Image (cartoon, rainbow, N blue to C red):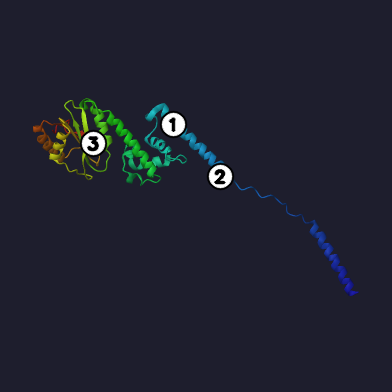
């Protein structure tokens, strides 16, 4: 009997526990929330692409409507880089270039080595800048070819400054003219350092005779940016004048170009 009593009590207890468990509400089951779409997902990529395309088209429209006067230097660089980087934002690269070099002219005239120091600039970007410079140089040179040089002096100065005014080392150039002051040849006679270029008077005169030139315009650049002539510049010019005169060759001028302008020894009455 004692054992039976124990079994009965066990069954009652189990039933009571079952009833108790049945009265406790189960926690609601909720479906997991969908993971938020990442910004770089398809929708984000499409939005970014649309934004870049819209920005680029607005720049192009402004350029076509107002020309270069309608856009600052960094945006002109930005547009040039569109072809190099068809899918990325080129504004940060353009702004880094302007911050380092200061102007559009300085950027396209900078050496490949210096350009590659800028984050985002590689071979393709350098190639594009060099192409722009070559085109500009060809265009300005075309303004003085087959024309009396002295009657298109402003164009001559534009060409010379573009050709070497922004270079990091000195170059000595000669423009050879015929008796009508038309350009026969344009040659770089020497490459130097940041502050000196060797010039050999005899070689200058010899080259003038080989071209049958009757006049010369001497040119060199000051990488410092200041075109003020030095005593050595003046003395060298006078030596060439004295050597060329007996052979019927005159020196019209010696022009010094730099980042900040130019200086004419003739205009300064130094020759």
Q: Residue 41 — which label?
A: 2
Separation of marks 2 and 3 at Cα, in angstroms: 53 Å
- Residue at the spot x=30%, y=34% of the render? 137
Residue 249 as seen in the image, left or right of residue 20: left
- Residue at the spot x=56%, y=43% of the render? 42
Q: Is 19 or 91 nearer to us in this picture?
A: 91
Q: Is 70 or 143 nearer to us in this picture?
A: 143
Label 1, residues with CA under 10 Å away: few <14, some 14-19, many ≥20: some
Q: Quadrant of residue 204?
A: top left
Label 2, residues with CA under 10 Å away: few <14, some 14-19, many ≥20: few
Sequence-wise, the earlier of marks 2 and 3 is: 2
Please state the horizontal and vertical placement of residue 21, each as a whole percent of the image: 79, 59
Please state the horizontal and vertical placement of residue 40, each as a whole percent of the image: 54, 45
Q: Residue 257 — which label?
A: 3
- Residue at the spot x=46%, y=34% of the render? 56
Please state the horizontal and vertical placement of residue 211, each as a whole percent of the image: 17, 33
Disc 1, SS: helix
Residue 2 as seen in the image, left or right of residue 131: right
Q: Residue 60 — which label?
A: 1
Please state the horizontal and vertical placement of residue 81, each as a whole percent of the image: 41, 38
Separation of marks 3 and 1 at Cα, in angstroms: 34 Å
145 is higher (above) or lower (below) than 29: above
Circle count: 3
Residue 231 seen anywhere in this rendered image of the structure: no
Which image quarter holds the C terminus? top left
Label 2–label 3 contact, CB within 8 A: no
Disc 3, SS: strand
């Amino acid at each position: 009997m004692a054992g039976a009593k124990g079994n009965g009590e066990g069954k009652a207890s189990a039933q009571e526990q079952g009833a108790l468990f049945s009265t406790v509400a189960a926690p609601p089951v909720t479906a997991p929330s969908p993971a938020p779409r990442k910004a770089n997902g398809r929708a984000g990529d499409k939005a970014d692409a649309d934004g870049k395309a819209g920005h680029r088209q607005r720049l192009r429209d402004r350029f076509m409507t107002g020309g270069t006067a309608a856009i600052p230097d960094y945006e002109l660089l930005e547009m040039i880089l569109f072809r190099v980087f068809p899918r990325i934002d080129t504004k940060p690269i353009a702004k880094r270039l302007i911050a380092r070099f200061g102007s559009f002219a300085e950027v396209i005239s900078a050496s490949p080595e210096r350009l590659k120091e800028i984050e985002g600039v590689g071979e393709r970007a350098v190639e594009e800048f060099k192409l722009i410079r070559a085109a500009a140089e060809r265009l300005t040179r075309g303004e003085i070819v087959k024309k009396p040089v002295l009657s298109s002096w402003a164009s001559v100065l534009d060409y010379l400054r573009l050709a070497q005014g922004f270079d990091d080392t000195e170059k000595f150039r000669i423009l050879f003219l015929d008796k009508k002051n038309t350009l026969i040849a344009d040659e770089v006679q020497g490459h130097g350092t940041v502050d000196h270029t060797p010039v050999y008077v005899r070689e200058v005169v010899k080259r003038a005779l080989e071209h049958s030139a009757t006049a010369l315009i001497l040119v060199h650049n000051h990488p410092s940016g200041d075109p003020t002539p030095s005593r050595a510049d003046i003395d060298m010019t006078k030596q060439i004048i004295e050597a060329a005169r007996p052979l019927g060759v005159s020196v019209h001028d010696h022009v010094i170009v730099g980042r900040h302008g130019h200086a004419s020894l003739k205009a300064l009455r130094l020759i």
